[in-house]
Structure formats: structure tokens, C-alpha cells
Image (spheres, rainbow, N blue to C red):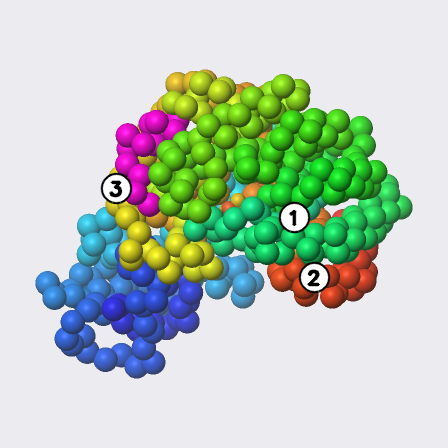
Amino acid sequence: MIKVFAEGHDYFYEVADILANYCRRDEIEFLREKVPAKGRGLFVHSKLAADKDGVIAKCTITGEEGPVVQEDRFEPADGNALEVRKQYKRYVKHNLLKAAERFFRKGLPWGILTGIRPVKMIHKLMDKGLGQEEVLKHLAEFYRLDPKKARLGMDIALTERKFIFPNDPGKVSIYISIPFCPTRCSYCSFPSNQITRWGHLTEMYLDCLTGEIKAAGTALKSKGITCDTVYIGGGTPTSLSLEQMDRLLGEVRCAFISPDTREFTVEAGRPDTLDGEKLELIKRYGATRISINPQTMNASTLEAIGRKHSPEDIVRAFDLARQSGHNNINMDIIMGLPGENLGMVMHTLEHIGVLKPEGITVHTLAVKRASRLHEEAFDAAMVEESEVEAMMKCAREYLQRMGMKPYYLYRQKYMVGNLENIGFCFPGYEGIYNMQIMEERQTVLGLGAGAVSKLVILSEDRLERIQNPKSLQHYMDRGMDIVREKEEVVERHCHANCL
Ligand code: SF4
């Protein structure tokens, strides 16, 4: 248990974000009063005070071996109240991390950048006119980033800028959620519904979804807005029947696809939902990119995580996709799956490597609260943080030897080892939607249950999130309201961006 007393500030969330890298989040308790550190456990006292010369942040961490005290002086904060608060938060996190690094003898690779989009920060610094070296220095000094992570982020930002700039509010991206899967993976925290149990709702769901698709398409066309990228994800969209896929893809093509559309992705995630007919259909409707996601090529792990297919099924699905003409295939893999070791990761990389997909996205396992694995974590053979780090390194080196380059990166809460997810690909096969959704430079309309629309207001450097209901039933019950909301989002996008 870590007891925390904050003095001179109320940045509880930020403090917890840093400490959660050193203990479980539910072990952190905030105190209303400063009490002396007694008994077992740790006591953290984080204090912020300002005087005429600047701001002083002081953190004391007391454990059985005595206290570690870290005091730092910062420049006076400037700007409006919101900006001042942001700077104060950074001071508190910076100071706390320095104390924690000394106390626990462990640094954080991403420093105080605890959010999920570290590359977004690099873009912001570059937008301000900072050169590469200045950005790297800033990341190390202000955010305590490990130089290797800063360099990785910078390389990715430089790649992304070729695809996501200049920002054009006359274009949006589309995300469509199909929240059905054949079975539920143990690590899954998405709103995914098992098709064997909820399959009877797919027709009704498609009725609502196509209503939303038509409304969004009409609203966009009436404003002269085109779709830059379209992504059908989930869940596993290919859980739908051939006839349902036909209907869905027809509606999507009619509503959103135009000569301006640079990318049209369909997630064909699970091989147990794929056959030649579906893959040909997807190609016929003009999908430019699909994703077949093995996660691992080890049969015992696939079984343990609740995926009812074999590594051979993955190879079969991949070959069928090639035969159907798909020439941009991504494959997702996960580092740190329970029971896996470095040798098993190497096995996965080698067996996927011979298939030569155009992209491989390497995820680090995140044990989220909504997942079954979260409940089972204590029983499951969880992999040590240091080993997951070694797996990530091994994957990165392997893919780079293949000639792939990292092109997008994001982080999640509860990731093992405070690492990251990285999309690798051969140059020319970058997933543009992935970059847009991470860097938040373009409005994304999210359609379907659980989908999130992000309204980007470039002139104000601001973002609004509008979430559709996560539950299938709730989404379907609110059918007409959701259609109206989507029309309003398009209207607001135009108004806010002076279109
Ligand atoms: S395939 Fe993806 S969305 Fe479906 S259950 Fe597994 S992790 Fe969740």
C-alpha cells in the first residue's frame, strides 16, 4: 500500500499515474491529512509551493529504509489559468518521478508522458518550430524521456508528417464498429459480443448501423466533405455472414468512398471467421488494406487466451487473402502473453516473417480491468516486465532486419512494463487511419456501438469526443437519436472549422 499526501496541489490523478508504474493502482491511497509514516508500506508526501523566484516542488518517499527527499526549483508558470495548471502538473510529476526513480531504482522509459499519445507531443513541439535536436533535448529535460524512446518517437513523427499534413478540414476519417467476435479473448477489454450468443442481434444491429452510415454519408456530402480513410473494426467485422458483409460494404462504399479516399481498411482479425468468398468480397468492394491478427503463432497460447483456431488456420487465411488479391495485409502480435517466453516470441516472428505481410503491429499486453485476464492475472503465468522488454526489443530488431520501419505508436493504460504498441511496415504500406486516430489532427466519425467520434477544431487546438453507447441494446434503442447526433457532429465540424 502507498499512502500519499498532496500539499499545495490537487493533482491526484497525475500522481497516481506516475506511482501506478511502481505498484498496482488500487494500492494507492490519498490521505486527507499528513500523518507520520508509521508501520508497513510507503508514504509519499508531494508538495508544491511558489515564491517570488519560482516554483518549488518537493517529494519525500518514506519506506522501511528511510526517506528519499527530492526538491526541484522550476521557472514561474505563465499563461492563462489553464496553462499555469498544466505547468504545475508537469512540475509535480517531474519531481515525483525523480524521487521515485531514486527510491525504486527504476526509471520510466516514457518519463512523465503517461498519456497514450507520446508522439502527439513531439508534433506539437515541431509545430512550434523546434528543430529535431531541440525537441530531443526538450523531451529529456522536461519530460524525462529515455533518449532511445525520444528518438523512436521522433522518427515516427517524421514519418507521420508525410501522411497527416497538411491538415485539411474538408476531409474526415470514418471508423465503423462491428462489436461481434467468435469467442472472447482473455485479454480483451473491447465491447465485443460473442457471435454464438448474440448472433441473433446482428441483423437488427446492421439495420441501425446502416441508418447511421447513410445519415453520416448524406450529411458529409451535403457539406462537400470527403472521407480520407475508412476503417471497419470491432470486434471482428468478418464475424458477420457473407450476405451481411455484402450489405455492410455496399452501404459503406456508397456513403464514404470517393477518389479522395486514400485508404479503406477492413479488420479480418480472426482466421476462424475467414474464407475465400469473404476475402474476395472485401477486395471487390475496394478495401485497400486488411488486418489478419494472429497475436501469437504458438498453439498452446492461442488456446490459453481463448482463441479457437490454430497457427495453421492463420497461414491458411493469409494464403487465401493473397489469392483474393489483398496486397496490403497487416498482422497484429502481442508481447507478454501469459506463459510465453522469448523463444516463443521468436517462433511467432519467424512464422509470420515467412508470410511477408506488408505490416506487423507489435502490441505489449495490457491487462485492463474489463478483461477476463485481469481477474485471472494472479493464476495465469504472467511474464516478468524485464522479459516483456526483451521480447519487444527482439521483435523490433527482427522487423527492422526484415526491412520494416516503425510508423505509428501508442500506449495504453495497464501495459506490462510501461512499454508501447508500435506499428511496423515496409515503406509505402503505412496505415494512415492509425496515424490519424492517434495524432488527432483530423475529425474522425465513429459509427456503431461503442464507437467514438473525435471532432478536431484545428483553429482552437481543441478536440471534442462524442461516444456512442457501448452496449448493443442501448445503441439499438437509441437508433434515431444517434442518427441525429451524427448529423449534428458533421454540422459542428463545419461550423468550428469555418466550412
Ligand atoms: S478478437 Fe479482438 S475484439 Fe474480439 S475478443 Fe479478441 S481481442 Fe476482443
Secondary structure under tag 3 reads helix
User: Does residue 15 lie above or below 271 as drawn?
Assistant: below
Q: Is residue 173 magenta?
A: no
Q: Residue at x 59, y 56 (%)?
A: 197
Three-letter amino acid code at the position of disc 2: Tyr
- Cα separation, mark 2 vs mark 1, equals 12 Å
Q: Nearer the viewer, residue 309 or 76?
A: 309
Can residue 128 be seen here?
no
Are dots 2 and 3 in contact, CB under 8 Å? no
User: Does residue 94 lie above or below 285 as drawn?
Assistant: below
Left or right position of 126 against 372: right
Q: Nearer the viewer, residue 409 or 493?
A: 409
Q: Which mark is residue 425?
A: none
Q: Residue at x 68, y 46 (%)?
A: 176
Q: Main secondary structure of the magenta part?
A: helix
Secondary structure under tag 1 reads strand
Residue span colored magenta: 338-349
Q: Nearer the viewer, residue 244 or 209?
A: 244
Residue to which mark 1 is pinned: 178
Residue to which mark 3 is pinned: 386
